[in-house]
Amino acid sequence: MKIFVPPIKCQGIKTKLVSWIKENLSEMKYSRWIEPFMGSGVVGFNVRPQNAVFSDINPHLINFYNAIKEEKITSSIAKSFLETEGTKLSKHGQDYYNEVRERFNKNFEPKDFLFLNRSCFNGMIRFNSKGKFNVPYGHKPERFAKAYITKIINQIDYISKSVKIFNWEFVCQDFRKTLNNIENTDLIYCDPPYYGRHVDYFDSWNEKDEKDLFDILNIIKGKYILSTWHSNKYRNNNELEKYTDNNILTKEHFYHLGATENNRNAMTEALILNYSPINNDKIIYTQFYGQQLQLLEPKVKYSSDFSQDSHQISQENLNNS
Ligand SMILES: C[S@@+](CC[C@H](N)C(=O)[O-])C[C@H]1O[C@@H](n2cnc3c(N)ncnc32)[C@H](O)[C@@H]1O
């Protein structure tokens, strides 16, 4: 499956999970796609729903997509902007990056946000306590080479075309507001910041947020998918224990730490669903440090602690399948 990569990148981008999420939508019918934590938007942009609300607390993401909708940013505008700015970056490097960052922190111009996102360190989005973008320079003065600009403008073109044929809204608001107005025919994809991980001005997440989201999802009318993490080498996600009445799907993937190929770390991702996915008769197992995990976990008491009990549950279901 060819995955569309959006023009703005962010931490926690779910590019690698898109196919898996799409598999679990299968032929499901819904009237609106609701994405209260859009981030880069990679999931919804690949699902391509007819009607969608993409929202996020970070106004710069939303402004960027509204600028495309309003044709203030088109592929040709972005091309000439990145060519001009890219030439200055290749001449002056860090100094020019800092100049654009200062300019952005005064005017919050969406084109500058694109420039910074594509030339900063690791394509990160991070704002300080005063709401100022503070990611350092990525130290690639030749960043905006011709091929790279072409890639970006194709990404913008994909969005420009999509917003013409689909009814996609981009709204800056807290998830509680987005989830306040849900119909039973809606499908919600939630990908909140992971509790206890990075914290930044727009991307912080605390115990109250975690609880509010759980309480809202517990009584919500529509169907939902919640992305979270299941476990890594060191820890299990205890928050999963709250979702015992749901279907929990897990999938292991590897990411690299540092430059060496050998330094591969496993992370098991989870999708929590308040409905049964279409392919629920197809039970797939993933191997996790010698433990068997079911891709589709049954509605049984869930324990994130790999004690004897939780392991037995997996084994029982393995035998029953
Ligand atoms: C893990 S990222 C989403 C990543 C996205 N699914 C992707 O693939 O790119 C979480 C997003 O939630 C947003 N966010 C944090 N707190 C929020 C809140 N209270 N309401 C709405 N959005 C929030 C952050 O700005 C961030 O963009």
Image: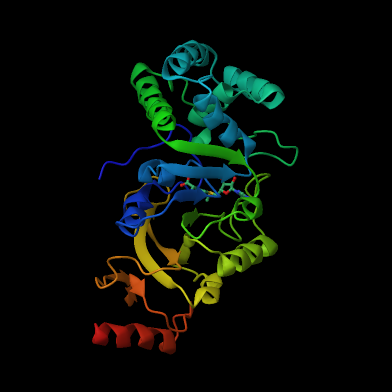
Q: Is residue 251 left or right of residue 86?
A: left
Q: In this view, does 315 lie above or below 39?
A: below
Q: Image quadrant of residue 51?
A: top left
Which residue lies at the image location 34% right of the left edge and 66% below the top edge? 277
The answer to which of 271 and 142 lies nearer the viewer is: 271
Residue 191: image location, x then y, percent: 51, 54
Which residue lies at the image location 40% right of the left edge and 42% below the top edge? 50
Q: In this view, does 1 lie to the left or right of 125?
A: left
Q: Is residue 9 above or below residue 305?
A: above
Which residue lies at the image location 57% right of the left edge and 69% below the top edge? 218
Q: Quadrant of the C terminus?
A: bottom left
Q: Quadrant of the N terminus?
A: top left
The answer to which of 298 and 287 lies nearer the viewer is: 298
The number of discs equals: 0
Q: In this view, does 300 lie above or below 49?
A: below
In this view, which residue lies farthest toward the right? 130
- Can residue 103 be seen from the camera position used here? yes
Q: Image quadrant of residue 214?
A: bottom right
Residue 243: image location, x then y, percent: 51, 73
Residue 248: image location, x then y, percent: 41, 70
- Colour scheme in use: rainbow
The answer to which of 61 and 50 lies nearer the viewer is: 50
Q: In this view, does 173 lie to the left or right of 225?
A: right
